[in-house]
Image (cartoon, helix red, strand yellow):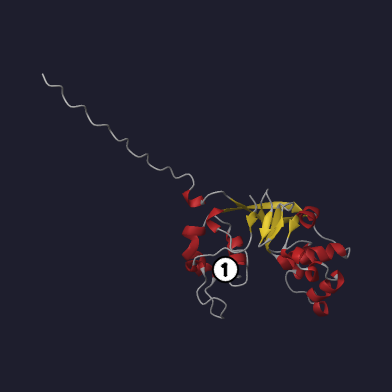
Amino acid sequence: MRVQLVGGKWPLRWMPRDCDTPGQESFTAWWSRVREELGHLDPRVLEQWIHRHWTHTVYRLDLLRLTSELRKMSTEEILSSVGSVDDFRPEDREVDSEALVRTFNPSGEPFEPAATMNATGSWNIPIVVLESPAGFAYGDRATPDVRLWLIEGHLRFRYLRALVSTGRPVAREHDVLLLTLAPGTLRRMGNRQRPKPRRRGRRPAPRAL
């Protein structure tokens, strides 16, 4: 079954306090509050996706059904196999790569992720990618042939594509935080329910002597 990427909701108890204000709750404090529920996920997934982009992300997946794993993926595999919202936005997909490189390196002083990627050929924080063998649905648009979808790390992804397009050196492999969606709620999986006691039938009445 295809994974529906948009339209979900998260409980407000997971929202960082003072969200989107200068005094937003730190990740350390937020993590201490939600760790009991979300501790099965890599903290790097939660920090860059949920904590940092609570009000901006459209991907409100069921976090209790997700698992995360750090993987190595080649540059070729990432650029050829990972779908993203850019696939629905020609203005982002067909951006001039040389212009994008200049944007990330104003006056020769790059900012992240370009600073690290210029020096090492890869990003400083792994991107977050969701895997679904049956493909994805983005609202009413389906991508049945796409098995991997970019959840977080769009600037890193675009910059990698721009570096490759302009012939600049990149690393052969990159760290990726791979998410998979389980069919049930993970926190309930594996919990054996106690069997209900059998109802005993009525004892037959004693026969009259």
Vertical position of residue 125 compared to residue 17: above or below? above
The front one of 189 and 198 is: 198
Quadrant containing the C terminus is top left
* Residue 168 seen in the current view: no
Q: Is residue 201 left or right of residue 64?
A: left
Vertical position of residue 104 compared to residue 168: above or below? below
Please state which amino acid type lies under the numbered disc 1.
His
The front one of 55 and 142 is: 142
The front one of 173 and 181 is: 181
Question: Disc 1 on helix, strand or loop?
Answer: helix
- Residue found 75% across the figure and 65% down from its top: 88
- Residue found 76% across the figure and 70% down from its top: 115
| x then y, percent, for residue 131 | 67, 52
**Residue carrying label 1:** 51
- Residue found 88% across the figure and 65% down from its top: 166
CA neighbours of label 1 inside 10 A, class few (<14), some (14 to 19), many (20+):
many
| x then y, percent, for residue 104 | 78, 74
